[in-house]
Amino acid sequence: MKVTVYGPGCANCTKLEAAAREAVKQLGIEAEVTKVTDVAEIAKAGVLLTPALAIDGQMVLRGKVADVSEVMSLITSAMDGS
Amino acid sequence: MAESGTLDSDVRSEPRPWRVRALALVAALGAWWLVYTHLVGFARWLTSTAFGLTEGTRMAGAVEFFVFEVPKVILLLVLVVFGVGIVRSFFTPERTRSLLAGRLEVVGNVLAAGLGVVTPFCSCSAVPLFIGFVEAGVPLGVTFSFLIAAPMVNEVAVVLLCGLVGWRVAALYVAAGLSVAIVSGWTIGRLKLERHVEGWVYEIRSAGDAGDGQQLTFAGRIDYGLEQVRTIVGKVWPFIVAGIAVGAGIHGYVPEGALASVMGKGAWWSVPAAVVLGVPMYSNAAGIVPVIQALLGKGAALGTALAFMMSVIALSLPEMIILRKVLKPRLIGAFVAIVAFGIAVVGFLFNAIM
């Protein structure tokens, strides 16, 4: 599973990245958390409002700082769907 | 995946029924009103009874001003940010983009400035937003109208101006900010500066609308509003406390009219000077409004003070550095010059007619 955080490095983006890492840790799943900071890459992904979060290439969150439990539930529902 | 089922039931909490939210909301609004209407008495009681200060002294005046204004402005901010948050939950940037794509100038500029106020915006995503707009066929000038209005005209600026300076000045600020955004964007569009956008911007083919986002429920919108309150009020309250503390000191101790000769109506050069000084500076509305209030109180002319506020909020060095990624220097120069000129015109106009 791939979890991608999109954000150029503002405070909110860092918070979301931390929440994503913590969520993966707490779920104890095999997942790679990456962060995309290049604005051109962020734009290419179709993100207009950062921070955004994608799970396996599917955009699940945009313009919102989610807390750990919310990211956990997003990951588990993505796992259900696949 | 065998595990996912068990994890799922642990993690997902049952959504509360919307009736509970509605009741809680009504109760919260009632409590808000009760507190707000009792602030004057509370401030007086705190100053004279709890702190034991003699009424009528300078110290008592300054303290009463502080213990009244701080909770008042923060209460107003909580209510307005919550309300605007609910409104914003209806406007995603994706939706605004599709409303603006292919719009003709003038109508597009007006619409973009208006949407700039209600669409959620974060200055750190200005560049991806710019690319996304241009790629979807939003004209360059219309995109700029949005980018100028979004940070400049917002609920924090309006609440602080209303609370500390007065609703007339707040209304003037909104009208002036929207006008500058509309006219500057339109001018940039007329100048046909598209070739001064970095070429790679036009080559980007994004993944399109990567899902239309979540369709929010009533409870979701309330949560969004509360989250906005937490983030925005959480970020600006120290500025408000510090700004009002300085303001309280000025109210009590600095003579009126101290600034009249430098920033008053008579000094015509003070408007361009305020803009030149304000452009490279950056502060959010919460930091600058208490300063504006202090300037006005010491005899600065309204047009000069508003021109200073607008140039600090709308234009800044960090923003130009961020935009340099997508704009060539000449377009950045044109953008800064046009917006600064518009702000100066507004300043002169207000000084002349008020």
Image: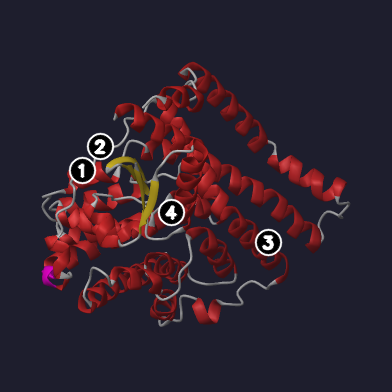
Extent of the magenta region = B191-195
**Tag 1's secondary structure?**
loop
Question: Which residue is rendered at x = 74% and y = 60% of the image?
Answer: B62
Say if mark 1 contacts mark 3, CB within 8 Å: no
Instruction: Name the side, left or right, on which B15 lies relative to B333.
Output: right
Instruction: Name the side, left or right, on which B106 lies relative to A26.
Output: left
Q: Is residue B278 above or below residue B94?
A: below
* Amino acid type of the residue tagged 2 in the rendering: Asp
Q: Is residue A23 above or below residue B279?
A: above
Residue wearing tag 1 = B209
Chain hosting mark 2: B
Instruction: Name the side, left or right, on which A50 lies relative to B335.
Output: right
Q: Determine the CA span between mark 1 and mark 3.
A: 47 Å
Q: Are marks 1 and 3 on the same chain?
A: yes
Within 10 angstroms of label 4, few (less than 14), some, or many (20 or more) residues? many
Residue wearing tag 3 = B245
Q: Determine the CA span between mark 4 and mark 2.
A: 21 Å
Q: Which callout, 4 or 3, points to the residue nearer the camera?
A: 4
Q: Earlier in the sequence, mark 2 or mark 3?
A: 2
Q: Does the magenta segment cover residue B30?
A: no
Say if mark 2 contacts mark 1, CB within 8 Å: yes
Residue wearing tag 2 = B212
Q: Determine the CA span between mark 4 and mark 1.
A: 20 Å
Q: Residue furthest right?
A: B52
